[in-house]
Image (cartoon, rainbow, N blue to C red):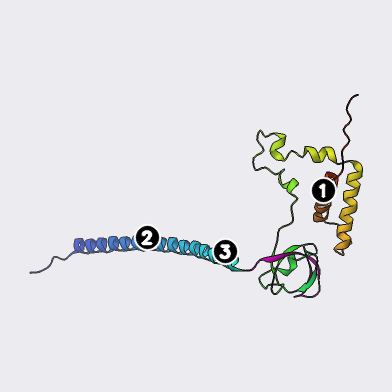
Amino acid sequence: MVEPTGPEVVVDERTKALNNYRRKLAECRDIEQKLKDLRKKESEMTKQFDKSENDIKSLQSVGQIVGEVLKQLSEEKFIVKATNGPRYVVGCRRSINKEELKQGTRVSLDMTTLTIMRQLPREVDPLVYKMSHEDPGNISYSDVGGLAEQIHGFSAADLRNVCTEAGMFAIRAEREFVIDEDFMKAVRKVGDAKRLETKLDYKPV
């Protein structure tokens, strides 16, 4: 039996081959998209795994000491003052950007090696933190902390004492200038002292 030949047969074979190529190309694109999705999912799972591993290590690790950078001695060594008083010459983890460890930066120290483990955010006064609000909207004065007692309690002399105390904190830290944390500590100290003061209530006779 002789198979049919001719232009029509050639065109039909080309059409079949072209359709087959298009089908394979579409399948290839689908596989590429699935591969991209799987790689993205793998990346997200890797991040979750690393975070979980770090959380477990944090739970298993010993507590750390909070301190403040006073001075950089060399490329690897820093003088850090711990919150409980002592000062140490310490090293730093390689993963930390040493250029960001400026004077006054809060850091955490390993209790065993006294190595700087991470850079901490700036200390925020709780009274100031209460004033922050995500959505201002229609909120009352009490919703942002109130502060009525502090506003009525501080006088011009108290503000002068705050500036003096902030300067003393800077001197104790061997700095020639004051930073925000100095004023925050000074406000708390003056506020605590004022709470101990007796108040005179004048009543009509």
Horizontal and vertical percent position of residue 157 = 92, 44
**Mark 1 highlights which residue?**
192
Q: Is residue 77 left or right of residue 48?
A: right
User: Does 168 sit left or right of 54 as displayed?
Assistant: right
Span shown in magenta: 62-81
For badge 1, the amino acid type reads Asp
Furthest toward the top, the residue is 205
Q: Which residue is depicted at the point 73% across and 74% down?
A: 91
Quadrant for the C terminus, please: top right
Residue 64 belongs to magenta span:
yes
Q: Which residue is mark 3?
A: 55
Residue type indicated by callout 2: Asp
Per the rendering, the mark at residue 30 is: 2
In the picture, measured across the screen, residue 73 lies left or right of residue 110, that is right
Question: Could you tell me residue 151's position as x and y percent?
Answer: 82, 39
- Whether residue 99 appears in magenta in the rendering, the answer is no
Q: Nearer the viewer, mark 3 or mark 2?
A: 3
Up the image or down, 155 lies above or below 168; here it is: above
